[in-house]
Image (cartoon, grey):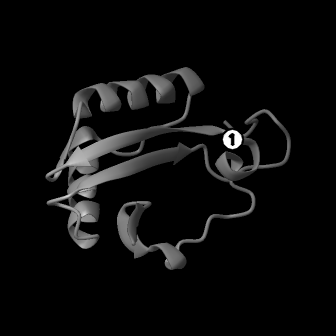
Amino acid sequence: MIAWFNGELWPLDGIAIKATDRGFTLGDGFFETMLAQQGQVAHFDAHMARLHESAHMMDIPFPYNTDEIRKAIDDVLTACQLKDKRAALRLTISRGSGPRGLLPLWK
């Protein structure tokens, strides 16, 4: 399987998440699970609206625009040979690495 990680396609075993990543250690992030059928994500606009709303509520920068996400999804479906199949996609956004403690104090 192939994933889109920080703007690039990677094999799953080539991805490393830092041990200090707040999404990994504290769940400080959000995700959206999407259904793709025949290369198209069902309710794509609603998924994007929820992602942007979550980013705003948690004060986490959303680093990619909608066109970039749409292209990333297409790239992943193509790389995994899933364009003509039904697939579940998960898009995860983490606050990223930071110092110890529960509050994101470096902002």
The quarter of the picture where the C terminus appears is top right
Q: Of residues 95 and 77, which is closer to you in this image?
A: 77
Q: Of residues 46 and 104, which is closer to you in this image?
A: 46
Q: Pointer 1: residues within 10 angstroms few (<14), some, or many (20+)?
A: few
Q: Is residue 14 above or below residue 42?
A: below
Q: Is residue 80 above or below residue 101?
A: below
Percent x, y for residue 34? 35, 41
Percent x, y for residue 10? 41, 74
Q: Is residue 68 left or right of residue 10?
A: left
Outermost residue on the front side: it is 86
Q: Is residue 73 left or right of residue 27?
A: left
Percent x, y for residue 65? 29, 41
Q: Is residue 90 left or right of residue 83?
A: right
Q: Residue at x 78, y 33 (%)?
A: 103
Q: Is residue 55 left or right of residue 20?
A: left
Quadrant in which residue 42 is drawn = top left
Total labels drawn: 1
Secondary structure at badge 1 equals loop
Q: Residue at x 62, y 64 (%)?
A: 17
- For label 1, the residue is 27
Quadrant in which residue 95 is drawn = top right
Outermost residue on the right side: it is 101
Percent x, y for residue 82? 23, 63
The quarter of the picture where the N terminus appears is bottom left
Q: Is residue 67 above or below residue 51?
A: below
Q: Residue at x 74, y 62 (%)?
A: 19
Q: Amino acid at mark 1?
A: Gly
